[in-house]
Amino acid sequence: MPDPRRPLPPSSPLPPPQPKAPPLLGEFIASAANPVLAFVRSLARRDRRAAEGAFVVEGVRAVRDALETGAVPRLVLLRQGDEALAADLAISHGVSVRIVDRRLFDRLSEVQTPQGILAVFPIPTPEFASEDASLLVLILDRLRDPGNLGTLLRAAAGAGVRAVYLTPESVDPWNPKAVRAGMGAHFRVPIAQLDAETLADLRARLPLRAVAGSEAGRPYDAVDWTGPAALVIGGEAEGVGPELREWASEEVGIPLASNVESLNAAVAGAVILFEAARQRRREAEGGRRE
């Protein structure tokens, strides 16, 4: 029995929690001629993105958004001095992570104030629902501004769009500016090129095929968007082409005050998509459509 007059020995402290092991960092790149940098630079071109099946995501938030969807990068570049980002973003050990000289990284970046991280991701393979009673599709025709495209993709993801199709004349959705504007939407909504076979399939499946037009007589919020539907948004200069106008079942518009002629493509598309989302939410809640 221990002597009560003697102090007890101090208890052994618990070992401090071990920090999560950071990803293994690879080579340090100090030459502008390094083939890794040449590969990343090549992805600024649409044909190389298509050939490689890959595109660039830059910035802390953009890379984090991509990782949160479960996407696995093929390559990560960190600016010298920003190595801690690899652990902060929980980049997997299996990913190739390289450190790049600060000046070289900043020259490689396409943004004015680089955040120290750039990743190359594989272009996602689109997976479309074969049967969906409330299918909502967005079609973009001859949309040429990458910022508008990215904003529309972000709105589509937020509004519950199940697929986005682009005509061949539209800007590449994997364009770096479109990717930055999309803020992770490229990983959250299926994106594909529109062709004649897809148009025929969508005509058979979607009773409502609405073209957005500045001179349409029917307001967008007078349309019942609760069933299978497609919204067609045209380019900034030319609008929707004749083929998709013929394919559509009707034209809808957004009433504007103060003699404003029109909204830009991204704003108009977002307004209509979120009206569709509002109606569908009320329908799902069992409410009465206003």
Image (cartoon, rainbow, N blue to C red):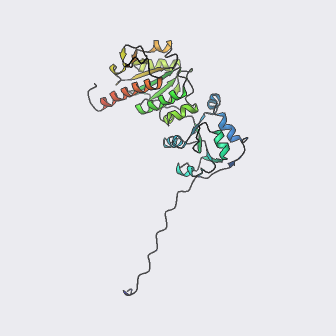
Residue 253: percent from left, percent from top: 39, 18
* Residue 133 in view of the camera: no
Toward which corner of the image does residue 162 lie, by quadrant? top left
* Depicted 124 relative to depicted 275: above or below: below
Q: Residue at x 45, y 24 (%)?
A: 138
Name the residue furthest front.
258
Toward which corner of the image does residue 40 lie, by quadrant? top right
State the quadrant of the C terminus: top left
Relative to 286, 89 lies left or right = right
Residue 215: percent from left, percent from top: 41, 13
- Number of numbered discs overlaid on the protein picture: 0
Of residue 74 and residue 35, the one placed in the foreground of this image is 35
Of residue 190 and residue 149, the one placed in the foreground of this image is 149
* Depicted 191 relative to depicted 199: above or below: below
Q: Residue at x 50, y 12 (%)?
A: 242
Relative to 168, 265 lies left or right = left
* Depicted 97 relative to depicted 187: above or below: below
Relative to 253, 236 lies left or right = right
Q: Residue at x 54, y 33 (%)?
A: 179
Residue 132: percent from left, percent from top: 40, 28
Relative to 211, 123 lies left or right = right
* Residue 42 in view of the camera: yes
Residue 237: percent from left, percent from top: 52, 17
State the quadrant of the N terminus: bottom left
